[in-house]
Amino acid sequence: MAAELSALNGLDFLSSADLNGAQTQALLTLAADIKAGRRNPRLDGKVLGLIFSKASTRTRVSFTVAMARLGGQTIDLNPSVSQVGRGEPIEDTARVLSRYLNAVAIRTFAQSDLQAYADAASIPIINALTDLEHPCQALADYLTMQEAFGSLEGLTMTYVGDGNNVAHSLLIAGALLGVNVRIGCPAGFYPLEKVVDQAKAIAAGRSEIVISEDPAEAVRGAHAVYTDVWASMGQEEEQSTRVQAFRGFCVDESLMRHADAKAIVLHCLPAHRGEEISAEVMESSASRIFDQAENRLHAQQALLATLLGAEG
Ligand code: CP
Ligand code: NVA
């Protein structure tokens, strides 16, 4: 294990900011090595718990398959069939699970609930998406960008749409990796100011962090154009007002004309074709969206191997 990564053994991954730049880059390298078959870390006998209070296809399946490939197992602790859903305190649940499991990946609403698990647990807690961040997603996203261009050096990632959890982790992880990150979003849907300030502090002038209300300006010359749904899980009632507010922020062929000629298109999925992205762009040769979904598996194998101190 690279020296940068061995320091992460036993730690939580609650935010993209829990890693430094060297660690983030080393995780991407390990993920690429695992994907190419150059590395085969082992977690035989280790067990990961999954507590998901929101729907998931990719995150749930990729964590489960990642543990299987590493030689370990996963237990699905769906809140509706565990005592979590009946109100057992987070602190008690976390302490008990620490006696059985080697790590827990949690998808929930409030970052403070995730933090409460981490504070009470003695095993690594992993953010599998909260309202604030989606740090495992950002690892797969920058792995996909690195694969497409060979290196992240001098690249620009533009995210068009809602300044949400996915945008927040892209900002922080991009800053750590020295990537320029631009967010094109309508007024009222900016990423949180504290996250933008955090990304700017991390970038420290090494790369640019820019927020713009003009999607064409944000996309100009970008190497990756990324979008996500306009209404995230928990915001379903705002769907119709958001469709109005985000008019002009669809990633379609006319918007893509402003990007670099070799630009790739990314989307964390699930997608709403005809809203945040056109069907044509999703299926275009620039789209790396399904490679990106696959990379969740490789990035999370690297993350689990690192946090659980895998051999090999
Ligand atoms: N991108 C992502 O996290 O997908 P799921 O909601 O299906 O896990
Ligand atoms: N922003 C979306 C991402 C889904 C993977 C949500 O939180 O619902």
Image (cartoon, rainbow, N blue to C red):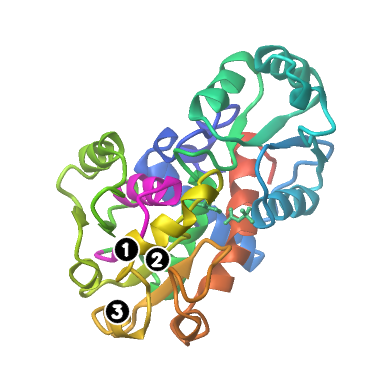
Give the image location of residue 77, x and y in percent.
Answer: 79, 34
Residue matched to label 3: 255
Q: Residue at x 73, y 29 (%)?
A: 102
Above/below status of 181 relative to 172:
below
Rounded to the nearest angstrom, the CA distance separating label 3 from label 1 is 15 Å
* Near-viewer residue (89 or 119): 89
Above/below status of 76 relative to 136:
above
- Are discs 3 and 1 less than 8 Å apart at CB? no
| Residue 167 - label | none
Q: Residue at x 66, y 23 (%)?
A: 123
- Are discs 2 and 1 less than 8 Å apart at CB? yes
Residue matched to label 1: 157
Q: Residue at x 38, y 44 (%)?
A: 22
Rounded to the nearest angstrom, the CA distance separating label 2 from label 1 is 7 Å
- Are discs 2 and 3 less than 8 Å apart at CB? no
Q: Please say whether residue 182 is visible from this viewpoint.
A: no
Name which residue type carries label 1: Met
Label 3 neighbour load within 10 Å: few <14, some 14-19, many 20+: some
Give the image location of residue 59, x and y in percent.
Answer: 65, 51
Name which residue type carries label 2: Tyr
Residue matched to label 2: 226
Label 3 vs 1, first from the N-terminus: 1
The image quadrant of residue 252 is bottom left
How many badges with numbers are in the image? 3
Rounded to the nearest angstrom, the CA distance separating label 2 from label 3 is 12 Å
Mark 3 within 8 Å of ligand 2, using the beta carbon: no
* Near-viewer residue (110 or 305): 110
Q: Please say whether residue 15 is visible from this viewpoint.
A: yes
Which of discs 2 and 3 lies nearer the camera? The answer is 3
